[in-house]
Amino acid sequence: MESLFNKQDNQKIIDRINSLSNTSQAQWGKMNVAQMLAHSQVPLKVAFGEHKLKRGIMSILFGKMFKNKLMKDEKPFDRNLPTDKTFIVVDQREFEKEKNALIELIKQFVEKGPNGLTKDPHPFFGELSGEEWDKLQWKHLDHHLRQFGA
């Protein structure tokens, strides 16, 4: 599976982002492209420890089970999966600003490497290794880029 820690794979994701325009249309879901770019930043900020969320009872009870399901293979995320309410972007955003901010976070991922990731548990999945953080981020970005045909 591709890795955001790998410079070439990291650049592939950036190239896919750069293939988007402010008129790119979603193939599913409710977000427009600028909202998707803003939304996609939040999980990266969680991985860096910049966006903190508390673990709820549902994550404690079911997080590990869902983590195992999502991590077991390279299968892409399904459409319309639930997301934390703080990840939902409903206001209008500026396409170029959000695109550049997302690309910067992705570059930081490869620059910081696994040691630059938070040691805090993921707010839903619990404890994650660097490899698991990487796989989760890759799948999330890939999911939303596919959503917009990139």
Image (tube, rainbow, N blue to C red):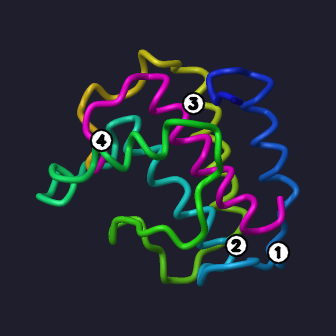
- In the rendered image, which residue does mark 1 sit on? 24
The residue sitting at the left extreme is 57
The label nearer to you, 4 versus 2, is 4
Tell me the mark number nearer the camera, choosing from 1 and 4. Answer: 4
Q: State the separation of the CA atoms marked 1 and 2.
A: 6 Å
- Tell me which numbered mark, 1 or 2, is placed earlier along the sequence: 1
Mark 4 and mark 3: Cα distance apart in space: 19 Å
Answer with the quarter of the image where residue 68 lies. Answer: top left
Name the kind of residue labelled 2 in the image.
Val
Q: What element does badge 2 sit on?
A: helix
Which label lies toward us, 4 or 3?
4
Q: Is residue 63 left or right of residue 36?
A: left
The span from disc 4 to disc 2 (Cα, nearest Å) is 26 Å
Q: Is residue 25 magenta?
A: no
Query: Which numbered disc flags the more N-terminal residue, 1 or 4?
Result: 1
**Helix, strand or loop for disc 3:** helix
Q: Is residue 101 left or right of residue 13?
A: left
**Residue neighbourhood size for the residue with mark 2, other residues' Cα within 10 Å, grouped as few (<14), some (14–19), many (≥20):** many
- Report x, y in % for residue 17: 77, 53
The amino acid pointed to by label 3 is: Gln
Mark number, residue 122 = 4
What number of labels is visible?
4
User: For residue 33, which numbered disc appears in the image?
Assistant: 2
First in sequence: mark 4 or mark 3? 3
Q: Residue furthest top?
A: 115
Whole-Å distance between the Cαs marked 1 and 3? 25 Å
Q: Which residue is mark 3?
A: 108
Which residue is painted at 66% across and 71% down in the image? 34
